[in-house]
Image (cartoon, grey):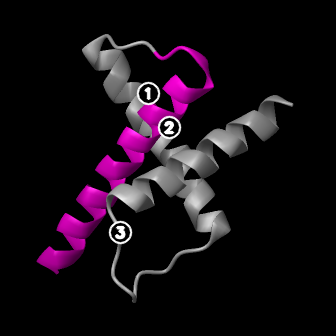
Amino acid sequence: MDLLIFLLVGLFAGILAKVVMPGEDNEPSGWLRTILLGIGGAIVGGLLAGILGIRAYGFIGHVIIAAFGAIVIIAVGRALSRRT
């Protein structure tokens, strides 16, 4: 059950991040990539929230922190891809 909740948080966070920062038509996207983006966002967002002393409570709180981390991942990825 915890794995299912983890994947749902990743999916919702990835979707929310993609809504906030929509990509170009040539950027790949799909369900698996969205879930992986959300999971990576959960890791990055959790680290940043821990450094800043922010705590998440409940499903929505975890999705928001994971989405923030996913937005950071998207922004850094786009900044690095434009440099090359």
Indicate the secondary structure of the residue bearing disc 3: loop
Amino acid type shown at disc 3: Pro
Find disc 2 in the rendering and name its residue: 42
Amino acid type shown at disc 2: Ala
Q: Position of residue 68 (x, y in %)?
A: 36, 40
Amino acid type shown at disc 1: Gly
Quarter holding residue 52: top left
* Res. 69 mark: none
> Which residues are drawn in magenta?
56-84
Q: Is 68 placed above or below 76 here? A: above
In the image: residue 64, left or right of residue 24:
right
Mark 2 vs 1: CB contact within 8 A: yes
Q: Earlier in the sequence, mark 2 or mark 3?
A: 3
Quarter holding residue 9: top right
Find disc 1 in the rendering and name its residue: 46
Give the prevailing secondary structure in the magenta stretch. Answer: helix
Q: CA distance from mark 3 to mark 1?
A: 23 Å
Find disc 3 in the rendering and name its residue: 22
